[in-house]
Image (cartoon, rainbow, N blue to C red):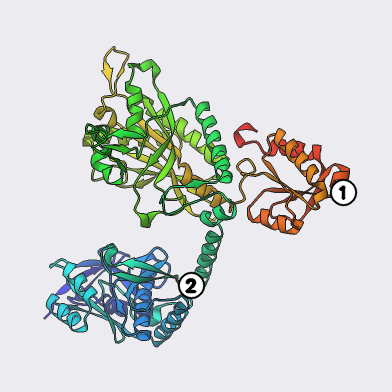
Amino acid sequence: MNKSISVSFPDGSVREYPQGITPAQIADSLSKSLAKKAVSACVNEIHWDLQWPLQDDCCIQINLNDDNPYSLELIRHDFAHVMARAVQEIWPDTKVTIGPVIKNGWYYDFDRDETFVPTDLERIEKKMKEIINRRDPIRTEIWSREDALSYYGEKGEKYKIELIEAIPADQDIRMYWHGEWQDLCRGPHLKHTGQLPADAFKLTSIAGAYWRGDPKRSMLQRIYGVAFRRRDDLKTYLNFIAEAQKRDHRKLGREMNLFHFQEEAPGMVFWHPNGWRMYKELRSYMDRKQKENGYQEVNTPQVVDRSLWEKSGHWEKFHENMFLVNVDEKIDPNERVSALKPMNCPCHVQIFNNSQKSYRELPLRIAEFGSCIRYEPSGALHGLMRVRGFVQDDAHIFCEEEQIESETKKFISMLSEVYQDLGFSKFAIKFSDRPDIRAGSDKTWDRAEAALQKATTAAGYEFELNPGEGAFYGPKLEFVLTDAIGREWQCGTLQVDFVLPDRLDAVYIGRDGNKHRPVILHRAILGSFERFLGMVIENYAGRLPLWLAPTQVIVATIVSEVDDYARQIVDYLTSHNVRALADTRNEKIGYKIREHSIAKVPFIFAVGLKEQQEKTVSIRSLGETRIQTLELEEAITQFKQRILPPDQK
């Protein structure tokens, strides 16, 4: 006879049940309507399949098909299985491999001789809806390792065999069936396929993928899908994706002629004149802001000997992401291994160390628009957002421990102004504490973490804990921006470092006449210029603020007889610091307007015989159909204030 177990519920009640009872049976005993709506359970805070038996005393919560996070995870997990089943029903020879849940949906990898094409997605979706409408029951069993290996061996499922062999010996081999279709899976799953919302999913794309992410292994085909609880949620998401695609900085970069990438320099940006003008405007703005806030600009070497990276600790933690520089021994047998610098910190300490410093010189704020090179895997590269060569708005504040609070306040104030000026009015702060692999003692980390938390609170800001994500030498604040369509971007950082000054022997003479270690505050506001500009382009959908726009005005001629007048206007605009170009091509004015609108030029001045005679311009603003005719002097008067960067108005 089975013994009884005690089951506690969220309302504090406790009931006795026979050992081996399932959450589905418990739900049914409580309420028929509860059992009907149930999708899974949480047992001692572990997500639990309704079919899994309970063997010991426990706390249980029945999860319903509502807005709890577990139900959405289950929906996406089951959709992955239903998609794999649909593929095999259509193409029986296809081998299924793995299909995890990811943000907003799932993917599944397939081994198939023929290549999936976009039209196949519609066919698979149709089959998936058929499977959902069958309302096939979902059941599970635990098998022995030997039985599972034998079963998949007979079916020739080499991928499943490899997955089973990788499962630790003390873990169950769990098998799931959706109707007659079977897969290896740890679960949990829904009760039947009919619990899936047939109108709230979409297959989105096809991609290549290596088996288990190993380029030396089989190349598979990956199908991505998204799913939500309700059709309206899916519609909202698809509209968001469409808007994000319209804002894709890579697409806009081509249309606006800003930059390009090519295979000969992966992850390195080729800036075109338009893009470089935008880049320089942002850099000039940041240069002014840093000078206003007491930073002195420096510049440090691009190639640095390995020994410095070893002293700083970066070689041990980061050398796999460094590009090494080796000179042919035939040229110089004494040349040592160096690296292109991936960050500026150790070099800035060398500047601090080059002369004796006094407490009277602290805080010392030094900044560099430092050109850095890091190895990023080719598969991770993504336009301006993930590159190998980039420039940081990097700075280091050398200060005394009691100055951490005041410097943190000043930095966050400066950062807030910059973000506001660049169109990001909202940001959040994450506090990242000690990682598992780190330098320095626990006592040192205790001091650093306490100091940074206290300083952030004193500055009047709340923060969210981000456990274990600190730098290897100290805790950090991460500043997360929200863009125009609600996406979050981690950009600025502030890190408190007690470790690097010790490793690189940085000292200053204190009030007592003795040597002391400074604290280093590592800080960046934009992070990478490249990535930040990608964000700005997407935030504004290419319609940049006038002060950042590479070309602010195009003077377009309607007839060739006014070409000289157009050039005179450009010369006049240029003399008033307006970035203007003339378009005197032998094209219709409508064609010119369309072309420059695609390139996101903020203003087009159209000039014809009438404008030449009256000394006026017809002004068309980007995205507007209304045309305003002004005398040239009046147009310049209006532009003078608008073209100024925010910090100069």
Horizontal side, residue 482 vs residue 397: left or right: right
The x and y percentages for residue 136 are 35, 86
**Residue at far front of view:** 330
Q: Which mark sits nearer the N-terminus, 1 or 2?
A: 2
Horizontal side, residue 59 vs residue 631: left or right: left
- As shown in the figure, which amino acid type bears the numbered disc 1? Lys
Alpha carbon of mark 1 to alpha carbon of mark 2: how far?
Answer: 58 Å
Q: Quadrant of residue 515?
A: top left
Residue drawn at x 43%, y 67% is 67
Q: Are marks 1 and 2 in contact (CB under 8 Å)?
A: no
Q: Quadrant of residue 44?
A: bottom left
In the image, which disc is placed on residue 610? 1
The x and y percentages for residue 318 are 28, 43
Question: Which quadrant: the C terminus?
Answer: top right
Q: Secondary structure at mark 2?
A: loop
Residue drawn at x 32%, y 72% is 40
Closest to the observer, 630 or 614:
614
**Residue at far top of view:** 513
Residue 275 seen anywhere in this rendered image of the structure: yes
The x and y percentages for residue 351 are 36, 24
What residue sits right under mark 2 in the picture? Answer: 230
Closest to the observer, 105 or 301:
301
Residue 438 seen anywhere in this rendered image of the structure: no
At label 1, counting other C-alpha atoms closer than 10 Å, the crowd grade (few under 14, some 14-19, many 20 or more) is few
